[in-house]
Image (cartoon, rainbow, N blue to C red):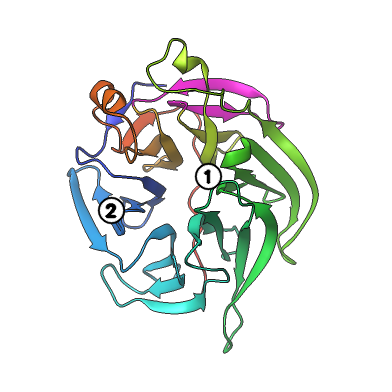
Amino acid sequence: MTAWQTVTTVANELGESPFWHPHEQMLYWVDIPAKKILRANVTMGSVQTWPMPCEPGCIAPAASGGLVIALRDGIYRAHEWNGALHRIAPAPYDTSRLRFNDGKADPKGRFWAGSYCEQRGDPTAALYAMHTHAGQSNTLVCMVDRATVANGLAWSPDAKTLYWADTAQAVIWAWDWQADSNTLCNRRIFHQFPAKPDGWAYGQPDHDAYWGRPDGAAVDVDGNYYVAMYEGGCVIKLSPVGQVLARIPAPAVCVTMPCFGGDDLKTLYITTARKGRTAQELADRPQSGCVFSMRVDVPGLPVNFFRD
């Protein structure tokens, strides 16, 4: 692995949902509280911004062009960059209390999005999969419920295992997944991280001994699970059976989500956050909120495209 490189110099409040678009050779991501989608030509160093009417929790590329976008009040379709937004499924929750968070398309082309309860400790968040019916309305099906902060969604290389995390509980779960019928079974703990220590704060002695809480994730071709650790200042690499293989320190304390990109999918990108962080932390980590990249030895899985 090489050292981290800065992809963008303009920091996000809460960067999330990065993916590498192989046809466009561009990196996409969202800034949730800033209500915008961004994309970068990493070779030219240019960044484009697309304002949204409300918070975009996650995005995925569509096979027929454009994006599918999970906004607070529903799932939307845009057929081109900066194009018209068409709501294709309303949010199945109380939008005054919840919004969409982490999500992506599965290997079959369905779009998945988890929700986030803004009243911490209230386990009303869930994971939804959108079933598209020819000539009919789209249906958001609840696949898992009773969570607080939906994160860590990913699939194994053989598309037989689904991973999902609840950040507040510091746990990553795994299920056996049947792709054709879109069914889950055999739920188990993939990895349980220690709880946040009482009174923990950045800048205290041994603050970096805390590894943080699991946020977004990505999987490589060997089935290793890379998870961003919010407040842990790192990315943790877990084996296919959930063992810690590496702790990769990051330039920001709040790492939010990784993805793999580049022609060979050996560039690991991460989004980070600065919203709500202390003045001391931002002085020590002035690039908090930026997007970073590093080269890795094993390629990642390519992004899945949503199929209308």
Number of callouts in the render? 2
Position of residue 121 measured from the top left corner of the image (x, y, whole percent): 60, 46
Magenta stretch encompasses residue 159: no
Look at mark 2 in the image and give the residue it sits on.
39
Q: Is residue 280 above or below residue 9?
A: above
Residue 114 visible in the displayed image: yes
The type of residue carrying mark 1 is: Leu
Which one is earlier in the sequence, the residue at label 2 or at label 1? 2
Q: Secondary structure at mark 2?
A: strand
Q: Residue at x 45, y 68 (%)?
A: 63
Magenta highlight range? 232-251
Q: Is residue 182 above or below residue 89?
A: above
Q: Nearer the viewer, residue 128 or 270?
A: 128
Position of residue 34 measured from the top left corner of the image (x, y, whole percent): 29, 54
Q: Nearer the viewer, mark 2 or mark 1?
A: 2
The type of residue carrying mark 2 is: Arg
Q: Nearer the viewer, residue 79 or 290?
A: 290
Position of residue 3 measured from the top left corner of the image (x, y, whole percent): 34, 21
Q: Is residue 126 above or below residue 174?
A: below
Question: Label 2 neighbourhood size at 10 Å, few (<14), some (14-19), many (20+)?
Answer: many
Position of residue 95 measured from the top left corner of the image (x, y, whole percent): 49, 67
What is the number of the mark on residue 301?
1
Q: Residue at x 49, y 62 (%)?
A: 305
Q: Residue at x 32, y 37 (%)?
A: 274
- Please state if 62 lies on the left or on the right of 283 as rendered: right
